[in-house]
Amino acid sequence: MDYITFPEGFTAAGVACGIKKEGPDLAVVLCERIANAAGIFTKNRVKGHSLRLSMKNIAAGRARLAVINAGNANACMGSRGDEDALEFARIAAERFGCSPEHVLTASTGVIGFPLPLEKIRRGLETAVPSREGGLDAARAIMTTDTVPKQARAEAVVGGKTVRIGGMAKGSGMIHPDMATMISVITTDALISPAALKSALVSAAGKSFNRISVDGETSVCDCVMILASGMASDKEITEDSPDFSAFLCALTDVCVSLSRMLAADGEGATKLLTIKVNGARTRKDARLICGAVARSPLCKTAAFGCDANWGRILTAAGYSGAVFDPEKVDIYIGTVQVCRAGGGLDFDEEAALNELRQKEVVYTIELNEANESDVMWTCDFSPEYVNINANYRT
């Protein structure tokens, strides 16, 4: 099923141009007309050249084409990288009949190697975007991913149904601030660039910035959204009564993609959902979620199906959050494994059964106040080390 082409006005393609050793590695998402656009980008001070060009082009709030290559990050290449990004956009613009200023570029893969523009040129010549090309595009942006990530949703705006579709890639170097992840989202809603940016920032704050695989933040990560405006005739602004309905649907898409990214972490065998309730402040809840999600000890315990609640409490303790350890209750799934900051005689077999599931939920009840947060991560397996020890070979 195709998701990125679910909204009206969009076609897509994914082809193999030879950047990767095998498989598709070049994706195209094309709008029938110039779309309103918005994006959010990595906070890493080191930024890829293709990403920097997209940051510049999207500032005007208009775009028609997104092109993404996998296998080469086009990063840390000095002036050549900037020139290659410009040529990447120019080649794509010429191929699909639009202005280079309306092209959004993204690259993901190995850092420090020149972008193979001739391979990209030949690949774009063979790319024929269609309504059926969404899955091919989602596959073409994968690097160490094992499955393509796609999601879609609908919202009723002004009495009309608008559609949102998205695709994402990312398996390692995943940590809040969106890291080595790339996502392209499309919608046929008629929405102003300012409202589109506001909605995207809000949705990402509840999704892409709430995941972590390994605590690493990449140089190429971005989320970009294009709105064709073809499903409605009344523009949504931030003050529109329909803005919240659009935001809710966009958040659903982003959360779905984020959970897929976390579940498909390099070498992962299960998705971990970290919930913190009863915190004094949202910041405290987020600090604890982040500490547990990043903890190699918590993540390896999940892989080994070890109900080691002490590791969870320890991570909470060094997170920087303010709380009373002697008030803390911890649950693995539905099984309480810690009460009032201490151990209890819990059912080990029941806890083991919870840890064997494809999604494991750690719930930390601070019993301080009413603030909460949630974060998604995955377990650490020996395969994570194997993948990253041999990434360039």
Image (cartoon, rainbow, N blue to C red):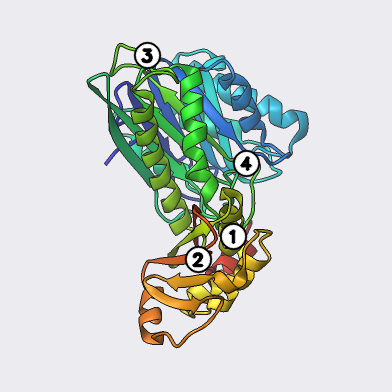
- What is the spatial separation of the Cα atoms under label 1 and label 2, in whole angstroms? 9 Å
Q: Residue 267 at what x, y percent from top left?
A: 50, 65
Q: Which residue is mark 3?
A: 235
- What is the spatial separation of the Cα atoms under label 3 and label 1, in whole angstroms? 40 Å
Q: Which mark identifies residue 364?
A: 2
Q: Residues within 10 Å of mark 1 (few under 14, many from 20)?
A: many
**First in sequence: mark 4 or mark 2?**
4
Q: Residues within 10 Å of mark 2 (few under 14, many from 20)?
A: many
Name the front one of labels 4 and 2.
2
**First in sequence: mark 3 or mark 4?**
4
Q: From where the camera sits, is residue 205 visible?
A: yes
Q: In the structure shown, which secondary structural element does the residue marked by tag 4 occupy?
A: loop
Q: Residue at x 50, y 67 (%)?
A: 379
Label 1 close to label 2 by CB (< 8 Å): yes
**First in sequence: mark 1 or mark 2?**
1
Q: Along the horizontal axis of the image, is 236 left or right of 200?
A: left
Q: Which residue is mark 4?
A: 73
Label 4 close to label 2 by CB (< 8 Å): no
**First in sequence: mark 3 or mark 1?**
3
